[in-house]
Image (cartoon, helix red, strand yellow):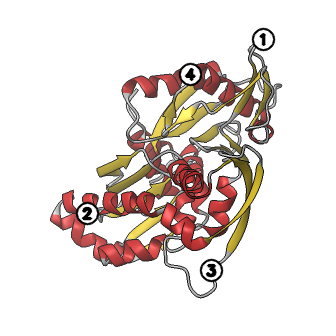
Amino acid sequence: MKLRLPPGVFANDIGIDLGTANTLLFVRGQGVVLSEPSIVALDRVRRTVIAVGQPAKAMLGRTPGNIEVVRPLRSGVIADFEVAQTLLRELIARVQPRARMFRPRIIIGVSSCTTQVEKRAVREAAMQAGAKAVYLVEGPMAAAIGAGIPIQEPGGHLVVDIGGGTTEVAVISLSGIVYCQSVRSGGDDMNESITQYIKKHYNLVGERRVEEFKLALGTARAAGEGPRTIQIKGSDIVARVPKTITINEEEVREALYDSVGTIVETVRVCLERIPPEIAADMVDNGIVLTGGGALLAGLDDIIRKETYLPVKIADDPLSCVVRGIGMLLDDLPLLKRVALEQ
């Protein structure tokens, strides 16, 4: 029988999807209450916080010499412990009333390729940010729970979680990860590929709005008649003057070719290495795509074509991990089964 905590006992407990690109917070009893870019703006001289989240992102490429804009997470792991601690502390403070008598219990989703040193850094950052206890859960597991996959059943389920810094392909059965393949390539890698394509073919630099271009024109399938176009403004490398160019979705698809190929190959490797009995389950259960990268048009079609398996994009794939973590806040027995060892 599933143990449910009485309402209000841990009403201030928090679930965090600490992502390379965005950090989402779930408060027990309230749902997803915050989604902010994982970016912090600091005063270089005083080392004080100027802005966190969206206000800091708006400063990218526009700061004077005394302001530094930092992304504390790279490829799914903490690259700058001090700034990551600042990010967590500031975001937790936004959702946690200062009048609270008790410190929150916090569950954080982390990449499956996170090392023991990196896990310890995440725990320490959360504790320094005011947590009473910290639990770490692997991102693919949390994503599967948030996508509504029955992870406690004996049948195998394959989840592809495409985040900002990593793509993780995991086969889950009986509340455990049977096999997981992780590559440090995701949405940021796609952005970089588009940036380099534009730089190479148009001598243009200016990466601040690449994410918007990817969402507007990004596709993994060949464009139909009359491909869509978009204007990009930046600085000409040679002439060193402002410049505007027009690119189409076929060019964006070409730029994303290698990144998409990496994701598809990771799925293929995973399918080749799992036990035959679980591989047979894939025929019925198929593949579920989660994370922001799942929204890339045509990606599900390409994976379906390459694997001959049914492919489904989860409902609201961007929030699958944090919703799964939120569900664990209400289910202590399952949390104890899936949480990483201290």
Instruction: For marks 4 and 1, give the CA distance.
Output: 18 Å
Task: Tell me the distance, in whole angstroms, between the alpha carbons under discs 4 and 3.
Answer: 44 Å
Res. 46 mark: 1
User: In the displayed structure, would residue 169 be above or below residue 130?
Assistant: below
Disc 4 target residue: 81
Q: Earlier in the sequence, mark 1 or mark 2?
A: 1
Q: Residue furthest left?
A: 276
At mark 4, the secondary structure is helix
Please state if 171 lies on the left or on the right of 66 as rendered. left
Whole-percent x and y of residue 295?
57, 66
Q: Check the picture and name the quadrant holding the N terminus.
A: bottom left
Instruction: Label 2, secondary structure: give it.
Output: helix
Q: Which residue in the structure is indicated by mark 2?
A: 271
Q: Give residue 33's position: percent from left, percent from top.
A: 74, 47
Q: Single out the residue that lies furthest toward the bottom.
A: 225
Instruction: Identify the secondary structure beneath mark 3.
Output: loop
In this view, 135 is above or below 283: above
Specify which label sits upstream in the sequence, 4 or 2.
4
Residue at 49% x, 70% y is 220
Dot label at residue 213:
none
What amino acid is found at the position of numbered circle 4 in the picture? Phe
- Give residue 227's mark: 3
